[in-house]
Image (cartoon, grey):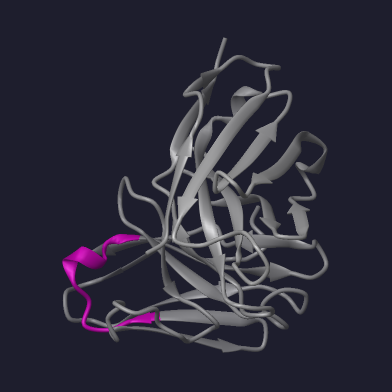
Amino acid sequence: QITLKETGPTLVKPTQTLTLTCTFSGFSLNTGGGGVGWIRQPPGQALEWLALIYWDDQRYSPSLKSRLTITKDTSRNQVILTMTNMDPVDTATYYCAHIGGYYPLERFDYWGQGTLVTVSS
Amino acid sequence: QSVLTQPPSASGTPGQRVTISCSGSSSNIGSKAVNWYQQLPGTAPKLLIYSNDQRPSGVPDRFSGSKSGTSASLAISGLQSEDEADYYCATWDDSLNAWVFGGGTKLTVL
């Protein structure tokens, strides 16, 4: 059974750096174990993909690449996302999700509950 | 403006069949598999359809997906009140090197 849970601050100030942790169980981020992605959703708006990580690869949204870093701690079954220079427009619910399937049929098949991050001074 | 285009809203009465479209281009839907997600109010998205037309275990067969060219569709037959939710299409875009989502369709069961 695959589960994921996001943790991090609920409130950050403009210009600060956001660090979110995704703690997962039921799979391993090793060869063939799939991957983990981060997706966000501003209030009342659509889903937006941010970044993903596999055992040996990381990918970023082109529009946010300069602000994002995704890393993994395989010993703790965690994926960490950092986003620099936070702005009020970054206020959103941030989700992490397991990436299942094999190329070219990947999908986000299991999602965390999400964590709401508000950016305000 | 989303890379994948969905109608913002759709509606139907209980028992009806409704379809939701998702339009893209050759760099995404035209060459990649499409996934659909259902997001009930206040909850995380749930995978509904993957690889264009496959249902994960536990998803009722009232839900079906299809793809033709650069467009995909989600069909819901025998509409039920609990189907009232937001629906999103998603796929990988080779030109952007990014996952892309549609803008979402809010389904109302009248």
Q: How many marks?
A: 0
**Picture coordinates of residue B28, whole percent (x, y):** 71, 74
**Picture coordinates of residue B10, whole percent (x, y):** 37, 67
**Picture coordinates of residue A55, whole percent (x, y):** 71, 60
Q: Is residue A57 above or below residue A73?
A: below
Q: Report the residue that reaches farthest toward the top.
A: A121
Residue at 44% in and 66% down = B37
Q: Is B73 placed left or right of A101 in the picture?
A: left
Identify the image quadrant of residue B65: bottom left
Residue B110 in sight here: no
Identify the image quadrant of residue A36: bottom right
Q: Is B14 placed left or right of A34 in the picture?
A: left
Q: Report the residue that reaches farthest toward the front.
A: A75
Which is more toward the observer, B6 or B98? Answer: B98
Chain part drawn in magenta: B75-85
Residue at 66% in and 23% down = A87
Which is more toward the observer, A41 or A106? Answer: A106
Residue B80 on the magenta segment: yes
